[in-house]
Amino acid sequence: MRLKSIVTFATVAILAGCGHEPTAATRSGGKPRLTLSSTIAGPTYVPNGVACTWTAYPTGGTAPYEYDWIGGNAFSATNQQSYTAEASSSNGTISIAIAVTVTDALGSSVTVQKRVTSLPGGSC
């Protein structure tokens, strides 16, 4: 009987060490963990030479959140819920994707993107 207990313990330890995790994620108190998701708010059409702002709005997961932005022209920003950038295109119209990866306090992350088109003239 004692041998069976040792084998069961060893199996659980080996599975846990190999990345096998329970499928039902829970947080302290046994409550189900909310799925992390996010949206990006901000303009879809951006005038050349005008600074515009996009903001990530995470829901679910566990606060606090971290933010990593990346997009066209190699811009990036870290740990800012909002990102402000100036679009510039020497040849008129350009379309890029901006993206943000939001990571919650427990390490869950989600990446969302928005297609943005730079146009001559106008305002945000």
Image (cartoon, grey):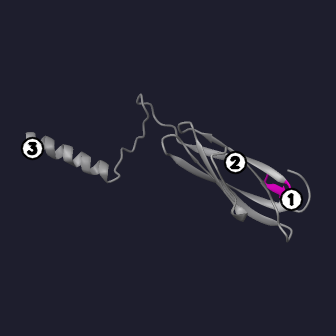
Q: 28 left or right of 54?
A: left
Distance from the alpha carbon under mark 1 to that under mark 3: 73 Å
Magenta span dominant secondary structure:
loop
Give the magenta-colored segment's residue range.
43-50
Indicate the amino acid at tag 1. Answer: Gly
10 Å crowding of disc 1: few (<14), some (14-19), many (20+): some
CA–CA distance between discs 1 and 2?
21 Å
Residue at (82, 63) in percent of width and height: 88
- Location of residue 100 in the rendering, given as x and y in whole percent from the top left corner: 64, 52
Disc 3: which residue = 3
Three-letter code, disc 2: Ile
The residue where tag 1 is placed is 49
Q: Is residue 30 above or below residue 48?
A: above
Q: Residue lying at the far top in this picture: please name it.
A: 29
Extreme-left residue of the structure: 1
Q: Name the image quarter holding the N terminus.
A: top left
Residue 107 image offset from top left, x and y in percent: 49, 45
Residue beneath disc 2: 40
Could you say which disc has been placed on residue 118 in the image?
none
Q: CA distance from mark 3 to mark 2?
A: 55 Å
Which mark sits nearer the N-terminus, 3 or 2? 3
The amino acid type of the residue labelled 3 equals Leu
Residue 102 vs residue 117: left or right? left
1 or 3: tag closer to the N-terminus: 3
Q: Are marks 3 and 2 in contact (CB under 8 Å)?
A: no
